[in-house]
Image: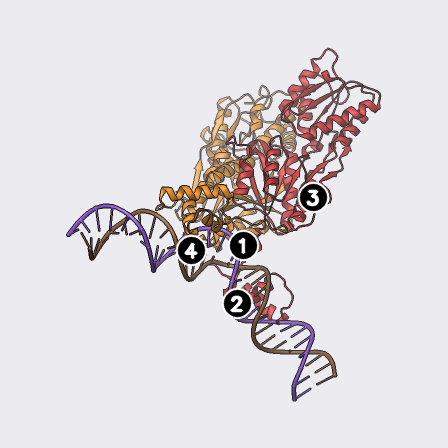
Chain colours: A orange, B red, C purple, D brown
DNA sequence: TGTTATATTGTGAACGTTCACATTGTGAAC
DNA sequence: GTTCACAATGTGAACGTTCACAATATAACA
């Protein structure tokens, strides 16, 4: 800083309170063995001088920064449109704050270098540990972190070799439940709107597996012609649905692998003059906040996004503190929610 | 960290290269006066040992952390639904990365303490400067930062007493252009969907002023019964529009003060069996990415959100480095974009 | 060849905190 | 009264880097 606001240090406080600086340190860190009277005097001095301990200086001897990094290997523009991801971030933020940690954001800068976001974090040794959001690009980054023995937890299905860990919802079971519901309602031809055919995350694979499993249980076989692809956005869901409706024998129900595409599907269905759910039932996935507000309110599979973020963060703290994670994979429940679109 | 991965320090590099540690420091910081041959030797040693300078240690003598804070005094759940804000963040992130800074996120934790997000940043002396997103709550936080002589820049209309600065778009002129367009098309009764009546940000005031100004230029007076309130979300725009349509003499055009509410308005209009823009024209504000994809594509006022974020970040760096900002208020152009909804 | 200026390198201290250990004080037990 | 154990506090060093300055090597000049 140019204007060198001079800092209030632990020594200033010590002088003010008439004790040694080490005693002040003990008070700050809630160490035992400080006479209550002394503690009070120090606390008072801290208050009077408006002292704030310096994180960087503190981290030096402790080899810690009290910062965790959040790597999101998307470009920021794109990623911030995903409500599910944003819910995760909110969970992460809450948990980090509760533990006195700060959250550093590292996104892909669009430099073309897939590992840039990871590199930047490593380059500065700035974080005690890293949370990685799984994307098609994140696996190489995780490998890099592992090689440097950097504590990290992955949000998604990425490789969770100890001591790292992966946290995700039970996508397979959620998709299975959703499909079973449609089957129970008598639907036999169910259209699937999947994520992009290339560069997809594993979660989509899992959802598809759950879907096929349910079909199999009902003695049906999966018909690949009923599966189309989107890119998670609403318009892509709309387009995908138009494809499905154009089939010679179109589906009577559509299961979109996220809510935004499901909303796009409903638009397309209406634009074609059909009704939801009467003519065609629609189910989404994620249960983003907008799902309940939609008209009709969306039947969907709730992923505990926020909780996943918080859980991953907690596990990361465990790893940082040397406690091994409960498992290399933590699976959170996915809950099927029946509203009005199916 | 529990597993004390021993760090490679500047001294290890020095030993490896057969020079003093200060020389290594000089190489890292691109200081002059290092013989090319020596520099090469050091660089090679850095490479060989995979050395990464430690940010915290570096910041100690320099009184800098190379981290900037981004305070968003909303709860994370809420804020992350705002595409305009997210575009700003993306601009901030890009600019910070380009300058070798890291971005720390500080949101409201829902503790009820309005200043929590600010306090946390100050408490740890963790950031060199702060970017503040203007909200109804942010003004007190800015005052706090100013009192502590902390460098900050506000994204919005918040008080920009030197050396701090406020960056925002020309909301007034944008709204004026939009209204003029409607007037030119012959509309005489224009409904306004404003932000919430309490706790609104100043940008909304400005938009309203621009609107009234255009009316006045056309010799019309502003009719308060045509103004209703939303909370920036799409459903709220829908509800607000229902109110407008229920008026004895409903408007022939609607100007919503953000795109999401404009989208809600279009839904409501259609649900009422009317057509956009034939029966009722709709204009939004922001030009969020979804606006162009909407059907019909939304006529709106583009705010250079991403650029605003980048500009604010640049100015913050200037302040941190002791250069005064160009002004206490930087106004970016707002561009009226005609698509199909009006 | 000696002198001086300059380019290059090295040395000690500092940044603000914590850690390991040394010192002092206090009361209990002998 | 001595001794001892333990509580409370103080001291020196360390964390990894940069800064200011001192020291040396090199080149340039007379």
- What is the x, y in percent for residue B230? 65, 23
Residue A328 visible from this viewpoint:
no
User: Which residue position holds label 1?
Assistant: B60
Indicate which disc, 4 or 3, sits on the residue closer to the N terminus. 4
Indicate which disc, 4 or 2, sits on the residue closer to the N terminus. 4
User: Which chain hosts label 2?
Assistant: B
Pair 4/2: label in front: 2
- What is the x, y in percent for residue A279? 59, 20
Indicate which disc, 2 or 1, sits on the residue closer to the N terminus. 2
Residue A53 visible from this viewpoint:
yes
The disc placed on residue B14 is 2
Q: Could you say whether the residue bearing mark 3 is in a helix, strand or loop? A: helix
Position of A267 compared to B107: left or right? right
Distance CA(mark 4)–CA(mark 3): 41 Å
- What is the x, y in percent for residue B329? 72, 39
Distance CA(mark 2)–CA(mark 1): 21 Å
User: Which residue position holds label 4?
Assistant: B4
Q: Quadrant of residue B299?
A: top right
- What is the x, y in percent for residue A91? 50, 36
Q: Is residue A252 above or below residue B49?
A: above
Distance CA(mark 4)–CA(mark 2): 22 Å
Q: Could you say whether the residue bearing mark 4 is in a helix, strand or loop? A: loop
């Amino acid at each position: 800083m140019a204007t060198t606001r001079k800092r209030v240090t632990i020594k200033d406080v010590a002088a003010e309170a008439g004790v040694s600086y080490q005693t002040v340190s003990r008070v700050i860190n809630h160490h035992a063995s400080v006479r209550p009277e002394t503690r009070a005097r120090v606390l008072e001095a801290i208050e009077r001088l408006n002292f704030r301990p310096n994180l960087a200086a503190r981290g030096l001897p402790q080899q810690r920064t009290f910062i965790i990094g959040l790597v999101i290997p998307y470009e920021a523009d794109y990623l911030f449109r995903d409500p599910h991801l944003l819910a995760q971030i909110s969970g992460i933020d809450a948990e980090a704050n509760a533990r006195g940690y700060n959250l550093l954001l590292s996104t892909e800068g669009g430099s073309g270098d897939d590992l840039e976001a990871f590199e930047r974090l490593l380059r500065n040794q700035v974080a005690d540990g890293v949370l990685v959001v799984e994307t098609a690009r994140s696996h190489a980054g995780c490998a890099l972190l592992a090689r440097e023995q950097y504590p990290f937890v992955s949000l998604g299905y990425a490789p969770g070799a100890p001591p790292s860990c992966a946290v995700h919802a039970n996508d397979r079971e959620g998709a299975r439940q959703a499909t079973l519901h449609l089957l129970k309602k008598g639907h036999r031809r169910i259209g699937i709107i999947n994520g992009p055919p290339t560069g997809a995350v594993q979660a989509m694979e899992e959802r598809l597996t759950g879907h096929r499993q349910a079909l199999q249980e009902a003695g049906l076989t999966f018909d690949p012609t009923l599966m189309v692809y989107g890119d998670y956005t609403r318009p892509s869901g709309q387009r995908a649905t138009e494809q499905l409706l154009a089939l010679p024998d179109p589906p009577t129900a559509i299961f979109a692998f996220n809510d935004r595409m499901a909303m796009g599907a409903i638009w397309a269905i209406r634009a074609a003059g059909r009704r939801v759910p009467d003519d065609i039932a629609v189910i989404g996935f994620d249960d983003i906040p907008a799902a309940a507000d939609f008209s009709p309110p969306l039947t969907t599979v709730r992923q505990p996004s926020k909780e996943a973020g918080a859980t991953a963060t907690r596990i990361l703290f465990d790893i940082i503190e040397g406690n091994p994670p409960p498992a290399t994979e933590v699976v959170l429940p996915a809950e099927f929610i029946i509203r009005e679109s199916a």
